[in-house]
Amino acid sequence: MDTLPSPPRLWAVTIASLTFFQLAAGTEAILIRHDRDDAQYRAEPAHFPFLAEVAAAQGTLIAPDWIITSAHVAEGVSPVSGTVRIAGRELRVRRIVFHPTWIGDLPPGLAEPEWVDLAMIQLAAPLTDVNPAQLYTGDDEDGQEVMLVGRGQTGDGRTGPRLNDRKLRVATNIVSRTDHRLLYFAFDAPPDGTRLEGIGGPGDSGGPALMSKGDVVFVLGVCYRNDGQGNDDVAFRYGTSDVYVRLSTHLGWICRILSNAMGDTIWHSVADAGWPNGELGEAAEQYFSAFASGSRDRMIAYEMKWRAKESLRGLSAEIRAEKWLTQFRRWRTLVPVYWHQPTPSMLVILARSGGQWRSVRLEMQGPVPRRVREIVIARERETDIPG
């Protein structure tokens, strides 16, 4: 377990008029028991002011200007002009810090990866009127009763997800198993489980597992996945487990980020600094070169050389090349200007495209030799470009 440095202090949230048991009695679930009325699971957003809407998923305010969420959720936030929503307000993002082991999602059916699906998002300005949740520092999570909170898809343990109304719901569950990195919440069918048993649904990724002690609400984990995902007949139903990243084993990393709260994203000029060394820089340089050529054969060759085999099974090199060629015909140019490297496996590039700016996020996955998992391009505003 990471050691917890003494600075910085961990901020606490108090809910003096609303105890955990009051919540459990009246407002629970995301994916719910089939023998309970959905109305019992609804929650008032004001009861959870520290909840954040991040991309199409969730996060939790754990310091006045920091949100913790899943890395795969944070990938959906622009590194240049990103925003999140807290307490009904849209807030600008200053920077995103991914866990250093993060290398992205892998196809279903593989063993549990060694990377950690966590990210920290710093707000452009601290929130002074919202009390953050507190990080849990104990190691006794096994058997604890918690609240699972989110706005994702809902349904019950027999049907699975079937409705996406973005209403806030809260479920209770028991930590059924732990390992060094993860917490597990089994979705038990009635009559087993808690009175208002539930788990998170699609769209609840990055959201918190919360535990109340007295007037303080603690964050124990961050929603990562359901262990039935990849099998639509099983996922998010009775008998599956929600899997959360266990925060108590990552407190050292979290607190180091909080301690470095004044840091900024460092952008490098391609003209001055060149590309980063290694496969990531080489893959990026060759991508822009292939794109600039406007050649279908060059683009196919790039896809065949650099794409992970699993990615090509989903979409062939020929189809991917044709998609890039379509973009080339529309844009004509995509010239890399700046880059920064949030993780060892991710590169974010700012590129000029005619009179516009675009961000290009290139991610790789292992094992060695690493290959490109994903290339995502988004338009950015001129006013958000560094320098």
Image (spheres, rainbow, N blue to C red):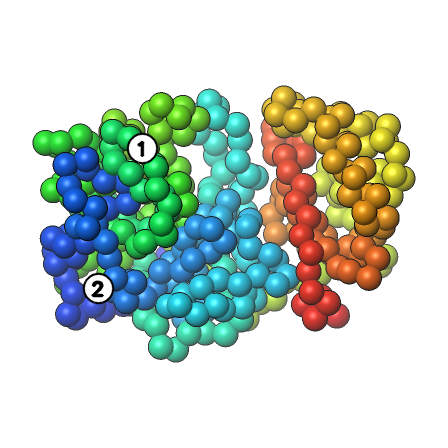
x 24%, y 57%: residue: 43
Disc 1 on helix, strand or loop?
Answer: strand
x 81%, y 50%: residue: 331
Residue 20: image x %, image y %?
Answer: 16, 57
Give the number of the disc on residue 216.
2
Q: Quadrant of residue 284?
A: top right
| Residue sitting nearer the eye, 360 or 347 | 360
Disc 2 on helix, strand or loop?
Answer: strand
State which mark lies toward you, 2 or 1: 1
Measure the C-alpha gap from mark 2 to mark 1: 32 Å
Q: Quadrant of the N terminus?
A: top left
Q: Quadrant of the C terminus?
A: bottom right
Other-residue count near label 1 (Cα within 10 Å), few / some / many at <14 / 14–19 / ≥20: many
Residue 282: image x %, image y %?
Answer: 78, 39
The answer to whether residue 253 is visible is: no
Q: Amino acid at mark 1?
A: Gly
Q: Quadrant of residue 234?
A: top left
What residue is pinned by disc 1?
160
x 82%, y 62%: residue: 355
Q: Is residue 368 left or right of residue 249?
A: right
